[in-house]
Amino acid sequence: MAKHSPVIGRYVTFDVDGCEYKVFYLQNGQGVPLVCQHTAGCHNHQWRGLLEDEEITKKYNVIAYDLARHGKSDPPLNKDWWKEEYRLTADHFVNFIVAFCDALELKDPIFMGSSFGGNVALQLALRKSDRFRAVIPVEAAANAPGFFLDVWRHPHANAAQVCASGVWDLMAPQSPERDRWLTWHYYTQGSEAFRGDLYFYSVDHDMRDSLSKIDTRRCPVVMMTGTYDYLTPPEATEKTASGIPGGIYIEMEDIGHFPMSENYPVFRVYLKEALRIIAEKTA
Amino acid sequence: MDIREWAVRFSEASDADPAIGAMARYFTCSYLFDMGEAKAIVEMVDGKIYRINISPAPMDPYDFALRASAATWREFARPIPRPMFHGIWAASFRKDLRIEGNTLALMQNLRNFTLQFELLRRVGVPV
């Protein structure tokens, strides 16, 4: 018997730094906007559990977009993008997110992202504290070197499998096998963008000297990292949070770098706590 | 478990693994497991174990090698490994695992090799 999900998908077109983007997003819920960024080389289906979480979507308008060049969001429509190597910068990433929120006329959204989405959440807290109610950087740190690798798109290897299996043990062995394989499946679909995303993640993102400038009275920061994350291990996130005046760190037990996708039932327990803290601080 | 018994158990587990079998064709490479006190060269041909050399000589060839202390290999073999011992990337970033040799061959076979490596959780290690 057919069953429809309450989640809907739409496209919205807007300009960022001279690039025309037609962006696909999934949406469900009502209340405070909760804007969600997928991980590098992936797409918004990583947020499938949250998008259908009845308890959270009763109070929050959950919106998960595909960053340009990912999923159903194409590269810039007005550029010969295939003639240049893709390297995502912090400036463009921040401008994209703000332009997306403007396009949807979102008022005081909470921004949540994982991995490179978590790192850009820190950038937003620093640069756009007037635009966001709060940020939830997941699996993030002030810097995350070491993953901008040529092997992600080496022509002598199957890039789809290299990316998907290369991130396999970013997940916890306790996470359900089916959800880990779904995450693997998503990662086979984004290999061309993965390395360019990681330019931001491992090279252009470095906030070690600016954490103290984040104003958490205007934009609370609640960081969360899983114990099985080897890229941004718990101690890296904890150190980052401790460098932010008023920064909060929550450690997530027995989960890895893709918590919303690899084990949503575990992730939601911590997410609800983060949302509770934010509601309290922004009441 | 001595290394001979380990080789038999590892071969049986790998050759019977349905996830490896689902994409076995062209899974052809050779690699060294250097566990300190024990070493083995595994030779794969089209997804099946062709041979495991349990007493490799200094000049015996292989494509790539995984080298770590015996203690780390024992951590790999726990049914649920502790954080940072739960894969070759994790252990090479955060622990004493070194991946050497032709790493492109590893990347070309990464999907199946990763599955095979995790068989150690069921098979155990000979150190």
Image (tube, helix red, strand yellow):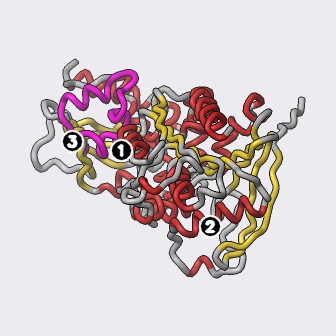
The residue singled out by tag 1 in the image is B89
The residue singled out by tag 2 in the image is A95
Secondary structure at badge 3 equals strand
Q: Is residue A153 visible?
A: no
Q: CA distance from mark 1 to mark 3?
A: 13 Å
Q: Is residue A267 left or right of residue B101?
A: right
Q: CA distance from mark 3 to mark 2?
A: 44 Å
Q: Which residues are magenta?
A: B66-95
Mark 2 and mark 1 in contact? Answer it, CB < 8 Å.
no
Q: Residues within 10 Å of mark 2 (few under 14, many from 20)?
A: some
Secondary structure at badge 2 equals helix
Disc number placed over residue B67 in the picture, else none? 3
Magenta span includes A220: no
Along the polypeptide, which appears first: circle 1 or circle 3? 3
The chain letter for the residue carrying disc 3 is B
Q: Give the mark toward the camera: 1 or 3.
A: 1
